[in-house]
């Protein structure tokens, strides 16, 4: 199975593998969503099953909850946990200030609530996610279904006065129906090419009736762990400015590499 993994998947795996070194007995851990976060959940599950690691996990989507239970992690709700020690999640883009675009997988609302309720947010990513300016990846905006077309038109109007290069907005689809989030909402993807003032844009979007949340994660992420296809890992901490580099040996493990469908 590992022989078939692409360099990107290897990069995601080594970033995930390094991230679980941050987890200690007794921690309440936010579990992100997406293919990179799925590697992390598998790595954590292995530590729970084989090393007796004792943690409680708060998933950020129904699919992460299913995977976490499957690999042996005790799953609790955010309301049961109240506050988390750390959240580990993937990202679609991150910049030098560790500001992010998230929501490519459609889980941005729960992801932002969970990350914000954590002492620390760690992002795991391959090198392709690093950008100079946010915005090449379409910015997801979660909107309530009621009046979504009106909300979309208002968002398009708002973008005229924003520091962005593109202004197209598209409803995310799942086949021939709108994609529906875990919270029963729709997602409008904004094709902005480059976001000049992310804080201003994020605040303006979230003030609109009908908008629930947007995928800009600003001043939330503390650490990015970057994985490379050859096993190198770089850990960047925005709080102390440190950059640590090391390498993870890629060892085949049937339990980890079987049946990843995310
Ligand atoms: C899901 C997310 C994911 O973290 C993001 O889309 C990255 O996914 P992947 O690790 O599969 O590249 O925000 O809502």
Image: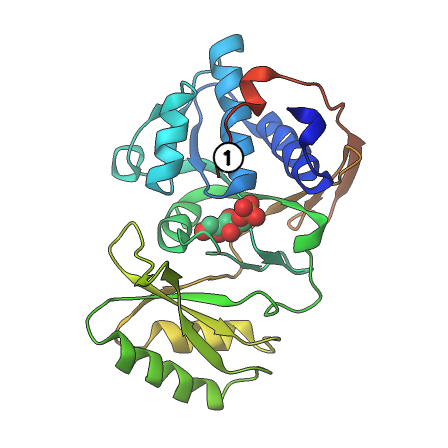
Residue pictured at 73% horizontal, 24% vertical: 250
Quadrant location of residue 155?
Answer: bottom left
- 59 shown above or below 187: above
In this figure, which colouring scheme has been used for the structure?
Answer: rainbow
User: Closer to the camera, 130 or 112?
Assistant: 130
Residue pictured at 48% horizontal, 76% vertical: 201
- 77 shown above or below 25: below
User: Closer to the camera, 170 or 155?
Assistant: 170
Label 1 CB less than 8 angstroms from ligand 1? yes
User: Closer to the camera, 253 or 227?
Assistant: 253
Quarter in which the N terminus is drawn: top right
Q: Is residue 83 visible?
A: no
Q: Is residue 33 left or right of residue 2?
A: left
Residue pictured at 37% horizontal, 51% vertical: 113
> Residue 222's spot in the image, x, y percent?
58, 48
Q: Residue furthest front?
A: 176
> Residue 255's spot in the image, x, y percent?
54, 17
Q: Residue furthest left?
A: 146
Secondary element at image label 1: helix
User: Closer to the camera, 114 or 42?
Assistant: 42
Quadrant location of residue 63?
Answer: top left
Please give the count of numbered marks on the rendered protein.
1
> Residue 74's spot in the image, x, y percent?
35, 22
- 128 shown above or below 41: below
Quadrant location of residue 59?
Answer: top left
Dot 1 surroundings within 10 Å: few (below 14), some, or many (20 or more)?
A: many
> Residue 121's spot in the image, x, y percent?
52, 44
Q: Which residue is mark 1?
A: 38
Residue pictured at 42% horizontal, 73% vertical: 170
Q: Is residue 259 visible?
A: yes
């Amino acid at each position: 199975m590992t022989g078939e993994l692409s360099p990107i998947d290897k990069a995601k795996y080594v970033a995930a593998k390094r991230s679980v070194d941050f987890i200690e007995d007794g921690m309440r851990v936010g579990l992100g969503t997406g293919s990179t976060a799925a590697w992390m959940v598998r790595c954590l599950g292995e530590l729970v099953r084989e090393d007796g690691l004792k943690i409680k996990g708060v998933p950020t989507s129904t699919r992460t909850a299913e995977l976490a239970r499957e690999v042996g992690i005790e799953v609790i709700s955010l309301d049961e946990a109240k506050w988390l020690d750390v959240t580990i999640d993937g990202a679609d883009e991150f910049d030098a200030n560790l500001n992010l675009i998230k929501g490519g997988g459609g889980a941005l609302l729960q992801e932002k609530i969970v990350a914000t309720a954590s002492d620390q947010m760690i992002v795991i990513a391959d090198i392709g996610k690093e950008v100079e300016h946010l915005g090449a990846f379409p910015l997801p905006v979660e909107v309530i279904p009621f009046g979504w077309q009106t909300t979309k038109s208002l968002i398009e109007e708002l973008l005229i006065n924003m520091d962005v290069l593109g202004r197209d907005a598209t409803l995310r689809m799942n086949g021939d129906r709108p994609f529906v989030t875990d919270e029963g909402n729709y997602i409008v993807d904004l094709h902005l090419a480059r976001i000049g003032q992310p804080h201003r844009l994020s605040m303006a979007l979230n003030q609109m009736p009908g908008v629930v949340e947007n995928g800009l994660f600003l001043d939330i992420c503390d650490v990015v762990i970057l994985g490379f296809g050859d096993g190198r890992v770089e850990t960047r901490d925005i709080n102390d400015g440190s950059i640590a580099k090391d390498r993870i040996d890629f060892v085949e493990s049937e339990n980890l590499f079987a049946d990843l469908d995310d």
